[in-house]
Amino acid sequence: MTSLSVETLAADATEPITSAANAQLGIAVLAGIAVIVLLITRLKLHAFLALTIGSLALGAFAGAPLDAAIASFSKGLGSTVAGVGVLIALGAILGKLLADSGGADRIVDTILARAGGRAMPWAMVLIASVIGLPLFFEVGIVLLIPVVLMVAKRGDYSLMRIGVPALAGLSVMHGLIPPHPGPLVAIDAIGADLGVTLALGIVVAVPTVVVAGPLFSRYAARWVDVPVPERMIPQRASDRLERRPGFGVTVATVLLPVVLMLVKALVDIVVDDPENHVQRVADVVGSPLIALLAAVLVGIFTLGRAAGFTKERISSTVETSLAPIAGVLLIVGAGGGFKQTLIDVGVGRMILDFSENWAIPALLLAWLIAVAIRLATGSATVATISAAGLVAPLAADMSTSHAALLVLAIGAGSLFFSHVNDAGFWLVKEYFGMSVGQTIKTWSVMETIISVVGIVFVLLLSLVL
């Protein structure tokens, strides 16, 4: 299979499409997504295999030659992994250093020592948001839930009053803030600026997490009152360490990549001269790769060495951090392949044709598409990747800020109403010892609030910017 086939397929996708062809493509997209949904939900197939098969099915349903569909999928997989694979790996290393060194425990203990009573839910949001920056959602849950359970037990707090804010902090970080995989892939697919997306993501995330966390937890605590499942309280990492890093240096290490990327975005806006020496330096230092790499290298000393880790222990920590992300990388890569197949068969052109006749803002359209895929597949990452591939053409004439808002609209939609087809649903249910109904009343409603409040603030920002 030569690259000519992919280029020919992509070229065809830019030509005007008839109504009949649009209808065929629309059916092909629905059929391709249906294949993915059925494989994941009914046959319990791994998302990587489901996305691979769904991509080939999409090409077949759209009438594309099979060899061209295979080449499109391979091209998309390769470019996606090349774009975000290293960043995901660096984020995993930083998160593992934070957990194993006891740095996460230091942050938690310091904040909790200074909070109490009504301030505790707000403290949990702060803890989850700071720790959630470099961590995958599942890792963040495993790390934070024991702390939530201990705080609820020792302080005699309602489990939902403490737990929901922590979950909200983690979920908002996961859906809206890079360097998490979903936002990174959406940024790459749409061609948005990472620094601007990060800055606007924080603006959207703060009010969203306040509403879905501390405020909603008041009602969640009334609806669901469950005892603390003591069997889920394991020994903390710091209990096995002779010493651990300090609070200030730990927070500084976690926030270092965020600060570097924000500095780059600020310099790009203020200087706005690609030939300027200051901007060139900022562009290098604030690039996601260098920013995360710097945080990892700094973390080896400020977290690993501060905890008394030997060179061998640090090497082991780095090695063990990479194994769990293999599945994430494969899913993200396959999602990129699905996105490229969508683009090459002409779905982008179809979306543009339809959107011209719809009185729906592009940001709201992106959110609705992500919501539909999220409800069908249960995966926020799959929803983000697929929706980004579908609406990427809409970003062609957008400003830098609106392209970033398009990413955030997709991210908000990808979090809508987590239910029984989402692994996160079952993770929360088991850790908190809730029934399916209780999990829906708390976790699922919280995710829906995040999604709706998120898109509301994205649309409000679009009016201002």
Image (cartoon, rainbow, N blue to C red):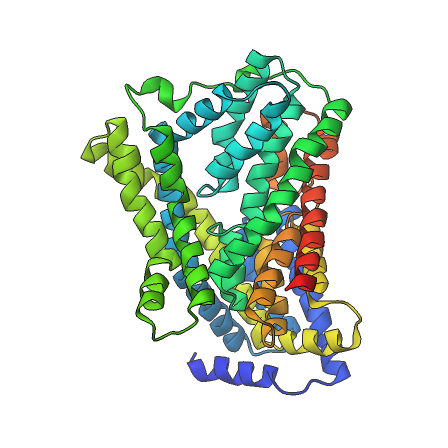
Q: Total marks drawn? A: 0
Looking at the rendered image, the quarter that the C terminus falls into is bottom right
- Spot occupied by residue 225 in the image (x, y as percentages of width and height): 72, 19
Q: Quadrant of residue 425?
A: top right
Q: Quadrant of residue 220?
A: top right
Q: Residue 18: image x %, image y %? A: 73, 85
**Vertical relation: 262 (above or below) 70:** above
Q: Nearer the viewer, residue 373 or 360?
A: 360
- 279 left or right of 379? left
**Residue 404 image offset from top left, x and y in percent:** 57, 62
Q: Quadrant of the N terminus?
A: bottom left
- Judge left or right: residue 216 versus residue 274: right
Q: Is 305 or 444 nearer to us in this picture?
A: 305
Q: Residue at x 69, y 29 (%)?
A: 217
Residue 34 can be seen, yes or no:
no
What residue do we see at 34% from left, 28% from top?
Answer: 246
Q: Is residue 246 left or right of residue 223?
A: left
Along the line of sight, which residue is nearer the eye, 45 or 238? 238
Q: Residue furthest front?
A: 270
In the current view of this chain or complex, which residue is farthest to the left? 311
